[in-house]
Image: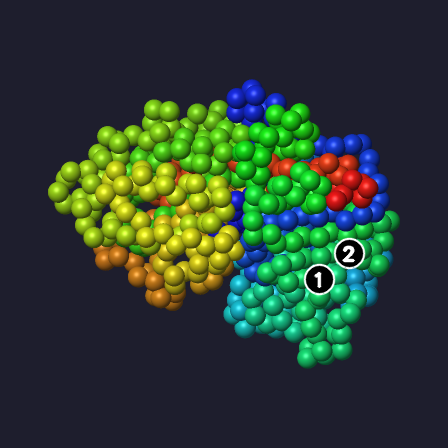
């Protein structure tokens, strides 16, 4: 499950031992400048898209990096560079980053003049295109996977229910002004407007797509590139619109220059737009991808390079081809609180205590690919506050699991009637489990199986591609008890973006990001066709999350979210977090400029360049 759901199996790197730190290349550009031209070629075993690349519902790391750097401009955005500078908001479509008025309830934006859509629309972007984007977010049929971020806009719920024809809280005094009226002060509202779903969408095209993911094959660009074949699409009527030729979800996504892009409306600190073309292609052979990159036949990948490939480059004195960046992400195992045996908190605690996190770390390639995680939100999201950096509610020697402590928890469970520290009932046999089939994630399976077997839990595992796994886990009616190799990277630089995963308002029939169903009520369960086990009450953190969200950014807000993190780990226990992740990329010798996009946790496609002469 980006997302933000990460495209599982992506490159993730943290320097551990000194030799591994030396192996990781810089996260900054390879050179101070790059040459315009050529094709930047990126390969992947699977795009991992959660909504077929439709920005209204797409919630994956891969897509966000492509949107921000290449296709979609938002009112405010980022410089798309590494580190703290990459998390700072800057104006994009808007002329400036505004300050809220009316006690934090009103936000007013003025759009830059002369920003035009790519073909086939070919017109100036107006404030009404922002409204169209939010109307799509509000429509339940389009399954906007992070639509919960915008419920504080006045009138969103009324519009969503069909009781109003417009969103009362979004007004457009003229074509270049858009005003948002909120029902409650929302300190992080600017960050929410930086998300790709909030970018402009032309109504004349989007009106033809009324089901989830439909618009993904015909996304109209507002950025420096467009999907190849955009200029050939006929938008005279809905019946004449055909998918853009450059995008086939099973094989390719090709982007070429947008002839209507005007660099004077943008900033080179955000987008240098050097390559003439970006070619994202599917190659099901992960080992072959990195052989091709090393040979100069491809330039980058959406997948993690195997540890062996990294070691080979280091041994051959080519460590400059390894690039890293901090992901602000956690990898975890998700447990569904409505499904046996994970409806019992003692089982969930036992699973945390028994898990061999060191083994999972090695399965991912060792310390180079992630540090041990002991709670939900990465420490970096709390500015490494000492109140959380040493927190570990389920410790074990060498992070290899504590059998005695785990069995002590199991004895308190209703699933251990024999009181032998094992799950003695049929509920713990052949538990339906979703796993991801990339190489690192497959390596994790025996580690998890071995750990759970010590508690009498056996698994019935279904291995799926990242996108298929995301689809199954995020569909509530599939009732997935256990999901392995899950990953979540921040939506923006605030701990609140992790906590929405546990709010009841995030639960949706499809595109559900609250896979553990924390906060599920009997009424909502009935609506979704989900059964809450008799006698159980699903814990809720809605009140705590709402209280934290009202606090202005600063130390008090951080402290509130730290306490909520600890409450989730000790009193709810929805996850087994096991790795704090960073990205690692292997690039080809043809790449002359490379940077990391901290906001999206991907390659900064807006700041890369290649030397075609070195490409094979």
In this figure, which colouring scheme has been used for the structure? rainbow
Of helix, strand and loop, which one carries label 1? loop
- Between 411 and 614, the one lying in front of the other is 614
Is 432 positioned to the left or the right of 377 in the image?
Answer: left
Furthest residue to the left?
418
The answer to whether mark 1 and mark 2 are in CB contact below 8 A is: yes
| On-image quarter of the C terminus | top right
Is 172 positioned to the left or the right of 424 in the image?
Answer: right
Q: In this orientation, does residue 19 appear?
A: yes
x and y percentages locating residue 611 in the rendered image:
80, 41
Residue located 52% across and 67% down the image: 140
Residue located 85% across and 49% down the image: 263
Of helix, strand and loop, which one carries label 2? strand
Crowdedness near tag 1: few (<14), some (14–19) or many (≥20) residues, C-alpha within 10 Å: many
Residue located 15% across and 38% down the image: 420
- Between 291 and 107, the one lying in front of the other is 291
Residue located 67% across and 57% down the image: 253
Tag on residue 480?
A: none
x and y percentages locating residue 506 in the rendered image:
47, 55
**Image quarter of residue 442:** top left
Return the residue at label 1. 246
Crowdedness near tag 2: few (<14), some (14–19) or many (≥20) residues, C-alpha within 10 Å: many
x and y percentages locating residue 309 in the rendered image:
58, 35
x and y percentages locating residue 267 in the rendered image:
81, 44
- Between 145 and 565, the one lying in front of the other is 145
- Between 459 and 306, the one lying in front of the other is 306
Q: CA distance from mark 1 to mark 2?
A: 9 Å
| Tally of numbered tags | 2
Return the residue at label 2. 256
Q: Earlier in the sequence, mark 1 or mark 2?
A: 1
Q: In this orientation, does residue 107 appear?
A: no
């Amino acid at each position: 499950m980006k997302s933000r759901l990460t495209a599982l199996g992506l490159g993730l790197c943290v320097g551990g031992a000194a030799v591994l730190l030396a192996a990781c290349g810089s996260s900054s550009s390879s050179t101070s400048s790059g040459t315009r031209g050529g094709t930047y070629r990126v390969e992947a075993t699977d795009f991992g898209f959660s909504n077929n690349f439709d920005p209204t519902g797409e919630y994956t790391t891969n897509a966000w990096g492509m949107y921000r750097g290449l296709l979609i401009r938002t009112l405010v955005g980022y410089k798309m560079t590494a580190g703290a500078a990459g998390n700072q908001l800057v104006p994009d479509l808007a002329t400036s980053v505004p300050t809220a008025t009316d006690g934090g309830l009103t936000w007013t934006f003025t759009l830059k003049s002369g920003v035009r859509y790519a073909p086939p629309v070919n017109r100036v972007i107006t404030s009404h295109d922002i409204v169209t984007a939010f109307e799509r977010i509000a429509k339940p049929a389009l399954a906007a996977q992070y639509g919960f971020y915008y419920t504080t806009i006045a009138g969103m719920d009324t519009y969503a229910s069909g009781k109003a024809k417009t969103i009362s809280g979004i007004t457009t005094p003229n074509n270049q002004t858009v005003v948002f009226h909120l029902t409650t002060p929302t300190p992080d509202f600017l960050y929410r407007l930086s998300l790709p779903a909030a970018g402009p969408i032309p109504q004349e095209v989007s009106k033809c797509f009324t089901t989830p993911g439909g618009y993904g094959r015909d996304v109209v660009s507002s950025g420096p590139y467009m999907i190849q074949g955009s200029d050939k699409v006929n938008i005279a009527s809905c019946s004449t619109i055909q998918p853009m030729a450059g995008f086939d979800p099973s094989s390719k996504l090709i982007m070429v220059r947008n002839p209507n892009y005007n660099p004077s409306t943008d900033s080179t600190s955000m987008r240098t737009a050097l390559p003439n073309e970006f070619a994202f292609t599917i190659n099901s052979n992960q080992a072959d991808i990195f052989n091709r990159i090393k040979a100069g036949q491809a330039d980058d990948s959406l997948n993690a390079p195997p540890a062996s490939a990294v070691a080979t480059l280091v041994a051959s004195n080519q460590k400059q081809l390894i690039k890293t960046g901090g992901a602000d992400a956690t990898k975890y195992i998700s447990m569904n609180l409505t499904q046996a045996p994970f409806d019992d908190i003692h089982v969930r605690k036992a699973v945390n205590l028994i898990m061999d996190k060191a083994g999972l770390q090695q399965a991912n390639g060792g310390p180079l690919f992630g540090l041990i995680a002991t709670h939900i939100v990465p420490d970096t999201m709390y500015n490494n506050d000492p109140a959380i950096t040493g927190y570990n509610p389920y410790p074990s020697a060498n992070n290899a699991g504590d059998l005695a402590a785990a069995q002590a928890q199991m004895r308190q469970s209703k699933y251990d009637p024999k009181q032998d520290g094992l799950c003695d009932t049929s509920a713990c046999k052949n538990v339906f489990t979703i796993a991801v089939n990339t190489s690192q994630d497959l390596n994790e399976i025996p580690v998890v199986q071995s750990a759970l077997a010590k508690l009498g839990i056996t698994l019935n595992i279904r291995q799926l591609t990242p996108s298929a796994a995301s689809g199954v886990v995020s569909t509530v009616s599939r009732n997935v008890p256990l999901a392995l190799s899950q990953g979540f990277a921040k939506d923006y630089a605030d701990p609140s973006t992790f906590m929405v995963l546990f709010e009841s308002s995030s639960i949706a029939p499809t595109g559900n990001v609250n896979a553990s169903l924390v906060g599920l009520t009997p009424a909502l369960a009935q609506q979704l066709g989900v059964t809450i086990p008799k006698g159980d009450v699903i814990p809720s953190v809605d009140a705590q999350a709402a209280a934290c969200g009202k606090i202005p950014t600063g130390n008090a807000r951080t402290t509130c979210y730290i306490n909520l993190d600890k409450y989730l780990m000790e009193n709810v226990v929805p996850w087994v977090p096991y790795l704090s992740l960073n990205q690692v990329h292997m690039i080809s010798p043809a790449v002359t400029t490379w940077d990391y996009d901290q906001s999206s946790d991907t390659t900064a496609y807006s700041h890369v360049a290649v030397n075609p002469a070195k490409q094979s």
